[in-house]
Amino acid sequence: MKGIISALLCSFDEHGQVNEKGLRDIIRYNLDTVQVDGLYVNGSSGENFLLTTAQKKQIFTIVKDEVQSDVPLIAQIGSLIIEEAIELAKFVTNLGYDAISAVTPFYYKFDFEEIKHYYNTILEHVENKMIIYSIPALTGVNMSLDQFSELFDNKKIIGVKFTAPDFYLLERLRHRFPDHLIYSGFDEMLLPAAVLNIDGAIGSTFNLNGKRAKQILTLAQQGHIMEALAIQKETNDFISAVLDNGLYQTLKELLVTQGVDAGICRQPLKTLTANGKGIVLDIANKYL
Ligand code: NGF
């Protein structure tokens, strides 16, 4: 489960329903064209926190059916409703997902004991491996090195998806846990994370830009930092254009320019205006 892992986008129709054909198209584009090393399903990029339980299960099922065992699959099952997290953890484990991942519980200001209880409770119910999903900018949950260490005492917790710009903490994590899987989560910061010897990266922009990301990771691992930096610069020109136009909407519309039926986002995420779609064409012409 190392390398460049796409945080999979999902295709929705104008009624907010999963467009199965579109989702299969997105998966095929990731596997056949971008050639990513794995898929992270129902994360932020999959609009997970806007989905019903039935839709989450539908997506997990379609992805496994399309991918089979071609690349590793990680299922994000985290939920504020712990029963839902457990139900989804069991569901994807039965489907044959290689690992589960769960966002740190958010909204209420949970203390660390509560966060630890959340992970350990999910894992009591399921025979699978867990990747913690740490994204403080969206959850408000910051964990210290010692707190990660306490979570890692549970042997089923095998790694972390680290979506934070804290390279001191990332270096300390790598140093203290050489055998845990550490994935970076900010695609625009892949190079500095790669220099710190991460195992891989999980990100939204890899749905389109995964080949450049793979080059950055590989070059950094080989010590060719300035060459990697040139590709990170080009990547960041691409990412900043995408972010300025609306992250998930623009990524989906970019897929549409490549012949992928990527659909639109679920409400309350906006749909692109005609002007926004024009910008997408410019981005596609320049970077794809
Ligand atoms: O989309 C976000 C929200 N972060 C993703 C990634 O860390 C998480 C990142 O790729 C993710 O994609 C998922 O859970 O599905 C950014 O989109 C990217 O670096 C652009 O900022 O922060």
Image (cartoon, helix red, strand yellow):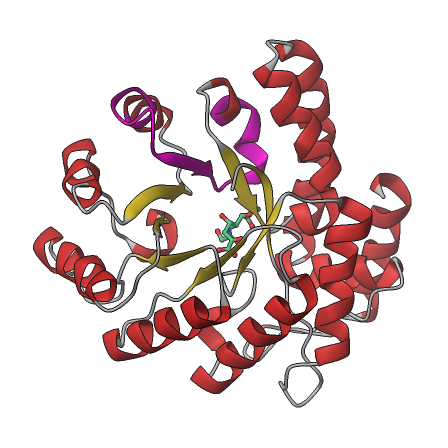
The residue drawn where x is 57% and y is 75% is: 61
249 w.r.t. 72: above or below? below
**Residue occupying the far left of the picture:** 113
Q: Which of these two is toward me, 288 or 87?
A: 87
Task: Please state, as top left, top right, bottom left or bottom right, where the C terminus lies in the image.
Answer: top right
Q: Is residue 272 visible?
A: no
Q: Position of residue 238 (x, y in %)?
A: 73, 40
Q: Which of these two is toward me, 19 or 154?
A: 154
Q: Quadrant of residue 235?
A: top right
Q: Is residue 203 left or right of residue 244?
A: left
The residue drawn where x is 19% and y is 64% is: 124
Q: Which of these two is toward me, 46 or 179?
A: 179
Q: Position of residue 221 (x, y in %)?
A: 57, 17
The residue drawn where x is 48% and y is 42% is: 185
Q: Position of residue 32 (x, y in %)?
A: 80, 51
Q: Is residue 246 left or right of residue 174?
A: right
142 w.r.t. 49: above or below? above
Q: Is residue 252 visible?
A: yes
163 w.r.t. 261: above or below? above
Q: Is residue 181 left or right of residue 201?
A: left
Q: Position of residue 175 (x, y in %)?
A: 30, 19
Q: Quadrant of residue 59?
A: bottom right
Residues in magenta, as a range:
173-193
Please say whether residue 179 is one of the residues in the magenta stretch.
yes
